Image (spheres, coloured by chain):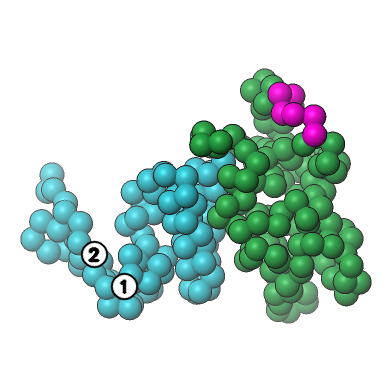
Amino acid sequence: MALTPETLPRHELNGLPVRVAESDDPGTVGLEGIVVIETTNTLQIEVRDDGGSRVVQVSKSGSVFEFAITDDAADLEKGSGTTSKLADSQPDSSEHDSDESDRAGEGVAYVTVDGSRLLSRPARRTETNGDSPWQ
Amino acid sequence: MGVAEERIDRLHDLARAAASECEHERARHYVRLARRIAERNRLSLPRTFKRFTCDACDAYLVPGKNARVRLQDGHVVVTCDCGHQARYPYEEQ
Ligand SMILES: [Zn+2]
């Protein structure tokens, strides 16, 4: 299962370009950078500004993140039958509480995710609501 | 390929990139996370991942930078900066 808007909440967030779209902490709104470290309750975002870079810690709860996922994931979304089938077969509930809006660019898809959906230990996010054979 | 395998692959790349920029603590973080995901999902890690990480301190090993690689009789010895050694057999062609 590739990194698609559907799988993103269970996928690896480290290394993804991200923008803080909304946040209870006004100081972090609009920050743009790369996720470098994920903890249970926060994302640490490396922001490059002129000259150097700094790492800002943003709380997951109370924030809305916009992740950019590139080419291969976006292509899979349109092209392959298997991914769309899987997406269709997901229970309706998960479709509705996910407020993912995809703005398609040139090979870039922007996925908006409420931080509260990412609240989990980084290593366990993959299992929590997924296709684990042990559930 | 499942999400867990893909996460491990991505973390492997991230760890390699971080180590080559001398962000060794960050690389360790990615190595540990990949190990934890493999453990929780009962997957074995790829051979290249095992060979390029230190079993003792979880460092991502870059030969010449934070690892020493020496050939001995029939095996390779990889020494991490922490002092831990790993030995792998090789066969001469
Ligand atoms: Zn070591």
Q: Residue at x 61, y 59 (%)?
A: A121
Chain with cyan colouring: B
Start and end of the magenta stretch?
A: A88-93
Residue at the disc numbered 1: B80
Mark 1 belongs to chain:
B
Please tell me whether residue A30 is drawn above or below residue A130 in the rendered image: below
In this view, the residue in front, A105 or B43, is B43
Q: Residue at x 62, y 38 (%)?
A: A130
Name the main secondary structure of what is drawn in magenta: helix
Q: CA distance from mark 2 to mark 1?
A: 8 Å
User: In the image, A12: left or right of A25?
Assistant: left
Residue at the disc numbered 2: B86
Chain with green colouring: A
In this view, the residue in front, A82 or A107, is A82
Q: Is residue A113 among the parts visible in the rendering?
A: yes
Q: Position of residue B30 (x, y in %)?
A: 51, 62
Badge 1 element = strand
In the image, residue A42 lies in the stretch drawn in magenta:
no
Q: Residue at x 75, y 51 (%)?
A: A117
The kind of residue on which mark 2 rests is: Ala
In the rendered structure, are the residues bearing label 2 and label 1 in contact, judged by CB atoms less than 8 Å apart? yes
User: In the image, B47: left or right of A41?
Assistant: left
Badge 2 element = strand
Please tell me whether residue B80 is drawn above or below residue A7 in the rendered image: below
The quadrant of the rendered image in which ligand 1 is seen is: bottom left
Quadrant in which residue A33 is drawn = bottom right
In the picture, which quadrant includes the C terminus of chain B? top left
- The mark found on residue A96 in the picture is none
Q: Position of residue A82 (x, y in %)?
A: 64, 23
Q: Residue at x 76, y 43 (%)?
A: A108
